Image (cartoon, rainbow, N blue to C red):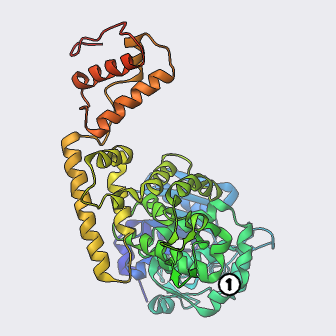
Amino acid sequence: MNFADTLHTNPIFEQIGRQAAALQVQAYVIGGFVRDLVLKRPSKDIDVVCLGSGIELAEAVGRAFDVPVTVFKNFGTAMLQVDDWEVEFVGARKESYRADSRKPIVENGSLEDDQNRRDFTINAMGISLNEGQFGQLLDPFGGLADLKRKLIRTPLEPSITFSDDPLRMMRAIRFASQLNFDIEPNTFDAIIQMKDRIGIVSKERITEELNKIILSPTPSYGFKLLYHAGLLEQIFPELLELKGVETVDGKGHKDNFYHTLQVLDNVATRSDDLWLRWAAILHDIAKPATKRFDPKVGWTFHGHEDLGARMVPTIFRNLKLPLNEKMRFVKKLVRLHLRPIALVKETITDSALRRLLVEAGEDLEALLALCRADITSKNYEKVQKHLRNFDKVERKLHDLEQRDKLRNFQPVITGELIMETFDLKPSREVGEIKEAVREAILEGTVPNTLEAAYPFMVEEGRKRGLAVVKELTVGSEQ
């Protein structure tokens, strides 16, 4: 197979070939770009291997395009950007590993050595950029055939590939999940046998691959592979605790592991947001800890949403996920995920809807998407009935939001105004009055305007024996 016509459409490849010839070295595009070219997937990342100094070749290409080159001398690599294409250069390498480290001992090598060190056959294909061979595919391990068969397979004996770098076990599952490929049986057996080796890999690198699995089109496939390979137990045991069904007196509960994966897939059809997908993964994470059997009603999981929310920071910390607003977003959705569904009843009050609007704030749409995804059953009609009921809740929430503008709710009565009015220092009384005003607004008895809320605040102060020291003229500047 020859890709000359395709490569000629991008001047970068011809220029690399021209500069390689001038330096009297050979250059090849290799790895993911070649794989994606065959699969017709968009890719802007180009990896170039040369038989010589990758840094020298990068600098020559950089001069030709008049773009800066970033050099990583310790790694013998260099990188440059032409328009929105990112090109990385490296000399062909031969690698060997110690048993206790992913960090290889690197030596100069041949193209064959470089292809041997690649993780999978589909990532070991190369395309020549050299005169006389320009565009020719170099495929020593049958990567092209594996792409056609939709198969993930290691170029060398899988136990060697995974022992050298155990992160490749995660990558195998990630590629299978992203591309909807199978993992070749011997390759998957080797992952099962070597799962404990994942322990020498940093949490950051593991989570990087895990996030890519979560962002794949059908993430449940990747999680099922992680489970059957034994890796899930190693990297995310809390999720595995959801698995299984317990039955007492003929009453069982759903398997919350597979339910969670279904919710995750449902979210994936609606959103590419990584953190909304994490909320789906963690929404029932506390069910094992809150599971109780009641002879009258069967299995209960009371409080799992609150305990689950409290578990989120620890799980994020363990997995080296960010402990910032992303974590707080997931924590909020886990805590609130039962609330919208509880509002399905016709008798529900505007007060309950207002409270949810205020608590969800800007994350209301994300919360509603999670709640829709959480409606799962093998009974199609039952799911449709619940979704129709949920449509009513959404309409009520949006109608109330349009009327009361509560998305960014802030009571007009502040602690500062209370202290100034009654000449108070920060105290319990200030908090009590502020909370009373907030509750009255949420109950709908007092509009969230200064004209209505100020007299209510004054009356709450008088109930506590407080006198107005500085009266506000409503409508004036404070």
In this rendering, position of residue 407 left or right of residue 196: left
Label 1 Cα crowd, 10 Å radius (few <14 / some 14-19 / many 20+)? some
Give the residue at the far top of this rendering. Answer: 469
* x then y, percent, for residue 157: 69, 88
Quadrant of the drawing holding the C terminus: top left
Name which quarter of the figure residue 388 lies in: bottom left
Quadrant of the drawing holding the N terminus: bottom left
* x then y, percent, for residue 65: 43, 56
Res 434 visible = yes
Give, as a three-letter code, the residue at label 1: Ile
Q: Across the whole image, how many numbered discs are drawn on residues?
A: 1
* x then y, percent, for residue 466: 41, 13
Q: Secondary structure at mark 1?
A: helix
Give the residue at the far right of this rendering. Answer: 99
In this rendering, position of residue 21 left or right of residue 72: left
Identify the residue at image location x=52%, y=80%: 252
In this rendering, position of residue 359 left or right of residue 186: left
Q: In the depicted view, which residue is nearer to us: 102 or 83?
A: 102
Reading the image, the residue beneath label 1 is 192
